[in-house]
Image (cartoon, rainbow, N blue to C red):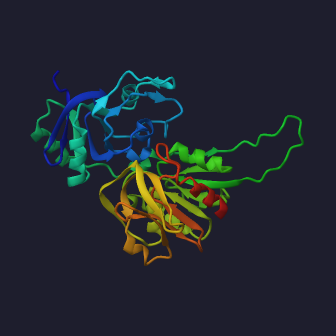
Amino acid sequence: MNYTRKIITETGDEYLGYGFGSGANRVCELVFNTSMAGYQEIVSDPSYKYQAIVMSYPLIGNYGMAEDDYESDFLSAGALIVHEYNDLPSNFRSVNTLSEMMIRYDVPGIYGIDTRKLVRFIRNYGSCKVLITDASTSREEGLKILNETSVPTDAVSKVSCSNAWKSKIAVNQPLGSKPVIVKKKHIVAIDCGMKKNIVTSLNAMGLDVTIVPWNTDIEAIKRLHPDGIFVSNGPGNPEDVPETIATIKKLIGEYPIFGICLGHQLISLAYGAKTYKLKFGHRGGNHPVKNLLTGKIEITSQNHSYAVDTESVKNTPLEVTHINILDNTVEGVRCVKDKVTSVQYHPESAPGPRDGSYLFEEFLKLL
């Protein structure tokens, strides 16, 4: 069987394989994910905008795509690279194959690649630009395209909602009973590419949530009369969204604030800390994090390329609350006085362990 598709890296390395999903040619940032399950949540996570994901687990597609497991209304990933792709899923919840959904949202895929070798390349060289293209494309032609094409920096604006919307919790009362007035807490969530399961987790705490676009100004937020502010996850470099950082600066001290992933980085920048790009990022469902406040170790779900600089936090009102056991990077900060807290990892999981779910309860206490 002749190869039909290939990957060309910015270093000139080539990886030949076979196509599934869309047949589009695409320039992306090459990253890897070590999760053993959850490919549907991963490819629909807006944080993967413009990224080609290498799945280190060898078999992908075997349980299809279920209607209830998407993290957004579209597939966000730039491309998907797997060792073995299964197009005949065995799962009573499956309504589509992975390839069918990738075709619908124009996401190219390659299988038959030695993904172990490719993951080692990323770990040694670091994340880099790659071209997903036809097998007939020459190395020289591919390198020319890579040299002339940049990975866009507008990822947050592409995956954020364009208009505000609400997710409310219904108050169920017995039929015929006297109506009870219930005062629920209401928060505004700044959508930088927010996963659906975060909204679900906030609603599960009894919170009504108004989701607003990434560039919503403070006056528009104040008019919504929130009890607190949530800053979501999202793709790319946090310094690419100065508008959101400026808004957070004005919100600090006005409302309790909780941030996740990109939201954690944006909050840190708003306080004057610095961020930097990791060599190959953290992506997977098995990252150990130490809670410095309790001494406990949490196994966490992560997806990010950037981290908060540890030394820079010392010059701010923030204190570090969590660290990554593997590389000592900052995984959480807080400012008790301002009622602000944030974590680098994903307490809502989807996919991944639920060790950090208590963070939503702590946010509720701050309100």
Please indicate whether residue 166 sits to the left or right of residue 277 in the image: right
Image point (19%, 26%), residue name: 4
Foreground of the two, 151 or 41: 41
Query: How many numbered tags mark residues here?
Result: 0
Is residue 108 positioned above or below 146 on the image? Answer: above
Please indicate whether residue 250 sits to the left or right of residue 279 in the image: right
* Residue 223 placement (x, y as % from top left): 65, 58
Foreground of the two, 97 or 230: 97
Image point (41%, 25%), residue name: 97
Please indicate whether residue 213 sits to the left or right of residue 82 in the image: right
* Residue 129 placement (x, y as % from top left): 23, 48
In this orientation, does residue 366 appear?
A: yes
Foreground of the two, 106 or 339: 339
Q: Quadrant of the C terminus?
A: bottom right
Image point (25%, 39%), residue name: 115
* Residue 7 placement (x, y as % from top left): 20, 38
* Residue 331 placement (x, y as % from top left): 44, 62
Q: Quadrant of the N terminus?
A: top left
Image point (20%, 48%), residue name: 121
In this orientation, does residue 164 appear?
A: no
Question: In the current view of this chain or complex, which residue is farthest to the bottom?
Answer: 315
Please indicate whether residue 140 sits to the left or right of residue 88 in the image: left
